[in-house]
Image (cartoon, rainbow, N blue to C red):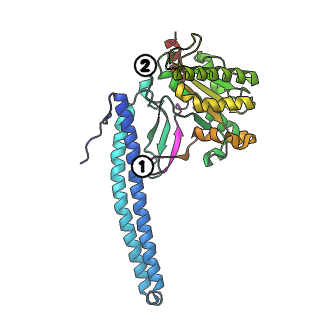
Amino acid sequence: EPSRPVAGDAAGWSMEERLYNQVWGMFEDLARTSAAYRSAVDFADGRMDRELDEVLSDPRHRLGGSGNAAREAAQARRDELVAQARAVLDRDLAQLTAEAEVVEPALPAAYARWDNPVWHGHTAPEQPPMAVRLGDLHLPERPDLRIPMLVRFPLERGLWIDNGRTGSEAAMTMDTDRLRRVAMDAAVAHVVRMLAVHPGGRLSVHVIDAAGAGAASLEPLVRSGVLAAPPAAGAAGVTETLARLTRRVDLAQMAVRAGAPEELPPDLDTSDQLLVVHDFPHGFDDRAVTQLRYLADEGPAVGVHLLMVADRDEASAYGPLLDPLWRSLMRLSPVPDDHLADPWVGHAWTFEPALPPAGSRVLDLVLERVAQSRG
């Protein structure tokens, strides 16, 4: 009998780190056991094909009645191998499912789904999180077995929520306006999570929404007063916001190079910064595009992070100039899409963003507590 799984049963100095490592262990286990099953099926199919080729190449089988028996025997051997592989896969999947059932309820807020009770009593922590949950990942062998997608924080690369309709089959079936709203709702959910799992005042959020098209999704953030400033609108707002954050990166880099990272101007916000850009490249001129690329490349090392909600096709006028920007960002889909690969065997995993349940007020409740923690 396999041992009963226990939440936090992994290496680490804290429960948060142990759970993080355990989730990644589950991720790797599911990737490898699925790879072993697929490899076994491919081997069985290949062997059957070779055996059938031998049958067809022998005139005695073609002319006599033994050909059908040989084909049936080859099919039976293939089915037996696949059944054995499936039994091993099912055993491993059952163990991983049991582990997920004990791990999911034990996850801290930074890793938890929005329907987890941990949010009901959540208060601002004393330390920033080591990672945040962006969504769930699953494979076709067991679609109901979801692995939390945890990304280390501070973010090493920016995030890009793709609201274009050419990104996936699911996106192509959705109305354009609906897809854009879902993408912006996903961005807001990520922002609320990051704010909630940081100590009060340790993360400042800036928003560029040049045309105001994301106002409906942004309304909870604006109403609660947790943004560093109202969403920047128009070309002037884009210019001012990018100039402020570019100065922040420049000064932080100079301080680090001088060996005095704490020696910063008193008017400079030293907390981590998160810039949310909606509807790019609307309102951006060539200089603003250059500054955005600079923030994407240099910002993460000094605590300035980027979250873009954009359709790459709308920026096609810039041609290959923006290719490095898109490559530097982690692409996320606002709808289920199998566009992410694992680092072990390279499976295509279906990603689903972490969104609150329909009709839930959890984001509003969390934002109220975030606002209270900031005084």
Q: Are marks 2 and 1 in contact (CB under 8 Å)?
A: no
What residue did someone put label 1 on? 31
- Name the image quarter holding residue 218: top right
Q: Which residues are magenta?
A: 342-361
Q: Amino acid at mark 2?
A: Pro
Instruction: Determine if residue 220 is in view.
Output: no
> Percent position (x, y) of residue 328?
59, 38
The residue sitting at 41% across, 25% down in the picture is 118
SS label for mark 1: helix
The part of the image, by quadrant, that contains residue 281 is top right
Going by the numbered disc 1, the residue's amino acid type is: Ala
Badge 2: how crowded within 10 Å, few (<14), some, or many (20+)?
Answer: some
Residue 119 seen anywhere in this rendered image of the structure? yes
Give the main secondary structure of the magenta stretch: loop
The x, y position of residue 50, in whole percent, is 44, 75
Residue in the foreground of this view, choosing between 12 and 217: 12
Q: Is residue 6 above or below residue 260?
A: below
Reply above or below: 288 against 374.
below
Q: Nearer the viewer, residue 158 or 214?
A: 158
Q: Is residue 280 left or right of residue 256?
A: right
The local secondary structure at tag 2 comes to loop
Considering every residue shown, the one lying at the far front of the view is 258
Q: Which mark is residue 125?
A: 2
Taking the image as shown, residue 185 lies to the left or right of residue 315, namely left
Total marks drawn? 2
Marks 2 and 1, how far apart in space? 33 Å
The answer to whether residue 348 is magenta is yes
